[in-house]
Amino acid sequence: QVQLVESGGGLVHAGDSLRLSCAASGRTFSNYHMGWFRQAPGKERNVVGVIYLSGGTTFYADSVKGRFTISRDNAKNTVYLQMNTLKPEDTAVYYCAAGVGGTYQWWGQGTQVTVSS
C-alpha cells in the first residue's frame, strides 16, 4: 500500500500562485510515477500533470502548460505541483496519485483549490 496526503490548497485570487504537496508513505516512492488530477463540481476527474520515476520526464494537460510545474523529491517522498497565474477555471479538488505501468493504484484524499475572479 501507498498512502498519499495532499496539502497546500486554499482560496486565492486570479493571477495568484499556490504550491500543492503530496507526501507519500508505505513503499519505495521512487518506484512509482506520480500524477496530479483535478475534479471540478459536476465534471469528471482529469489529469493535470504526470512525473515519471526519477523526475526527468513530465507531461501536462494543455490547459495548464506554461503555468503549472510538477516536480518530485524522492528523498522526501514528496511530489509538488507549482501553480502560477491561476484562473477561476482552475477551481477544483486536486488529487495526487501513484502508479505503475500507466495506471494509478493509489490516490490521496484531495485538496480544494478555489480561484476567485
Image: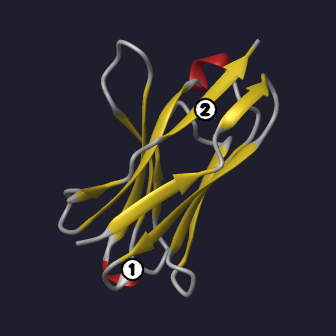
Residue 61 visible in the displayed image: no
* Disc 1 + disc 2, Cβ < 8 Å: no
106 displayed left or right of 110: left
Task: Locate the C terminus and report the quarter of the image it occupies.
Answer: top right
Amino acid on which the number 2 mark rests in the picture: Val
54 left or right of 66 in image? left
Q: Amino acid at mark 1?
A: Phe
Q: Disc 2 designates what residue?
A: 113
Residue at the image position 47 percent from the left and 58 percent from the top: 5
* Quadrant of the frame with the N terminus: bottom left
> Residue 82's spot in the image, x, y percent?
67, 51
Check disc 2 and report its element: helix, strand or loop. strand
SS at badge 1: helix
At 40% across and 62% down in the image, what residue appears?
4
Above or below, comparing residue 47 to residue 24 in the picture: above
Residue 97, image quadrant = bottom left
Disc 1/disc 2 C-alpha distance (Å) = 25 Å
Q: Quadrant of residue 43?
A: top left
116 in relation to 47, above or below? above
Estimate how packed mark 1 is, as few (under 14), some (14 to 19) or many (20 or more) residues with alpha carbons within 10 Å.
many
> Of callouts 1 and 2, which one flags the residue occurring earlier in the amino acid sequence?
1
Asked if residue 30 lies left or right of residue 66, the reply is left
Q: In this orientation, does residue 70 appear?
A: yes
Which residue does the numbered mark 1 point to in the structure image? Answer: 29
Return the x and y of residue 13 as percentages of the image width and height. Answer: 80, 23
Q: Residue at x 51, y 53 (%)?
A: 6
* Figure quadrant of residue 116: top right
Residue 30 placement (x, y as % from top left): 39, 82
Out of 100 and 40, give the one closest to the viewer. Answer: 40
